Image (cartoon, grey):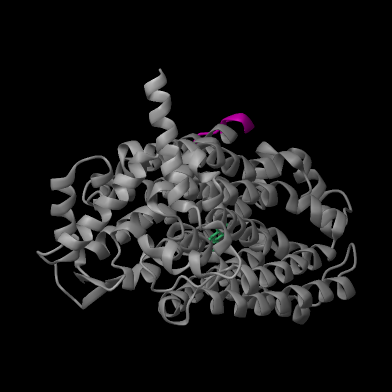
Amino acid sequence: MAPAVIVSTESGGKKFAAKLTWRVVMCGLIASTGGLMFGYDIGISGGVTGMDTFLKKFFPKVYIKKHLAKENNYCKYDNQLLQLFTSSLYLAALVMSFFAAKMCKRFGRKLTMQAASIFFLVGAIFTVISANLWMLIIGRILLGFGVGCGNQAVPLFISEIAPVKYRGALNICFQLMITIGILIANVVNYYTAPKVWGWRLSLGLAGIPALILIVGSFIISETPTSLIERGRFEEGKAILKAIRGVEDVDLEFDEIKEACERANRIKSPFKNLMKKSSRPQLVIGVLMQVFQQFTGINAIMFYAPVLFQTVGFKNDAALLSAVITGTVNVLSTLVSIALVDRAGRRSLLLEACVQMGISQAAIGAILQTKLSLTGSLEHGTAICVVLLICLFVSGFAWSWGPLGWLVASEIFPLKTRAAGFSFAVSSNMLFTAVIAQSFLSMMCKMRAGIFFFFLAWIVVMCLFVIFFLPETKQVPIDEMVDRVWKQHWYWKRYMVNDEEEDEVDGANALEKGVSA
Ligand code: BGC
């Protein structure tokens, strides 16, 4: 437990002593393997759906359309079942994230992560031995259960163990792992594509990150917040001392305990979430995810190889281009880790809107003017499209990608944190599924116009950041209400009755108890 840097965590004038210990770093890294599982899945499906052996076995109609019919460029892969192969995972994750919120609260973040890895391992085994489409879909659903649990527990876990000064950077490790997972999947697809059993290997390797998380989860400690929330005070304090690397943690312990006591008084966090005082966090938590998906990122992450084939690359060049965009994704996420706690959330998001908007507009214009229905782009123009996609991906990777998760994990007060975050996770899953299920069909109908559709969304999200997203950089999680929401020009109107609402709730509960 080497005290690399001494930090003081400011909390409303109080100072929490803390060091950036190896234990925090290690726990954060192990937990982020959950991101690796998620990312691997995002990256693997596009490559697999482009593989002929896979298509012949499970989607013969698409195979015929791709090779035999003189089908127009934009419609080769337009098939609802094929899209269901991708989207089923996210629909399952959507359902699971609600249960995962309860699991996180009742059994802790660590156990929820263990459940995630087991679902994931079994799901990977199912997909690898699939003999028919339905086995494949069942495997994807199990993987989705894993993603639902992991995406709920991991960001919460990291936010709760991180010293405030490094919360942003540590939290982005989750996103970094997602991008590494996507890149590994892209590389695996590149090598396995020519082999007859390539798709089985591609899908089966998803079991490796799951195994890492299973083993790793025995090494990491539960978060102090989760232990204290469940009444295990001594243990919570001991772990707090260990992860902060200092003996005197009384101030921070008391603050967490107080927040937990308030949270435990709330009998129904979901009902609480519907109250007026929770509206700002709920709206922002959900919208950040909706906007993240409507940047159009997953049109690229899921279907990049398919998209690159559409503009005229052969299968291996298309897979190689996906490796290139995957690499840009990882490297740009590192930029975010370096900048997020200094530049702040808002400036990264706004800069990225401009960058992503320019690339979407340019890609749309090129395809509109240069890609005929049955021909392909000239080589130079196709390379230009790849570069524009890299520009888009880098903007996303240092902003909406990591910050969608970070902002949602840090804006809710403890009493609604797990429930609120689960809403955010499920919104992400829902809209990921929507994009997965509809992108190929939308591309068939809208052709190049699909890029202008995403551009319009980028304009909306830019306005949203300007007017409605407060800066949360360097604000301790448990002080967001006072220091952020109560100060915001618009959201402050929802904050006035926060305490009263809780008390009225408590009084009503008491009254009901007495009259019963
Ligand atoms: C998003 C994913 C996306 C990935 C790309 C994540 O933050 O939730 O949907 O595929 O970033 O890196």
- Whole-percent x, y for residue 434 in the image: 69, 48
Q: Is residue 149 visible?
A: yes
Q: Is residue 464 above or below residue 77?
A: below
Ligand 1 shows up in which quadrant of the image? bottom right
Left/right placement of residue 244 relative to residue 372 reads left
- Whole-percent x, y for residue 498 in the image: 47, 52
Q: Give 314 or 491, whichever is nearer the viewer.
A: 491
Q: Residue furthest top?
A: 516
Q: Is residue 36 above or below residue 122?
A: below
Image quarter (top left, top right, bottom left or bottom right) of the N terminus = bottom left
- Whole-percent x, y for residue 436 in the image: 67, 50
Residue in the picture at 49% in, 65% down? 486
Q: Is residue 425 above or below residue 1?
A: above
Q: Is residue 150 visible?
A: no
Left/right placement of residue 408 relative to residue 57 reads left
Q: Give 237 or 364, whichever is nearer the viewer.
A: 237
Q: Give 428 or 126, whichever is nearer the viewer.
A: 428
Image quarter (top left, top right, bottom left or bottom right) of the C terminus = top left
Give the total of numbered labels. Answer: 0
Q: Give 363 or 515, whichever is nearer the viewer.
A: 515
Magenta span has 152?
no
Rendering quarter of residue 25: bottom left
Magenta span has 131?
yes
Rendering quarter of residue 473: bottom left
- Whole-percent x, y for residue 392 in the image: 64, 74
Where does the magenta region start and end?
Answer: 128-135
Residue in the picture at 64% in, 63% down? 297
Q: Is residue 301 above or below residue 60?
A: below
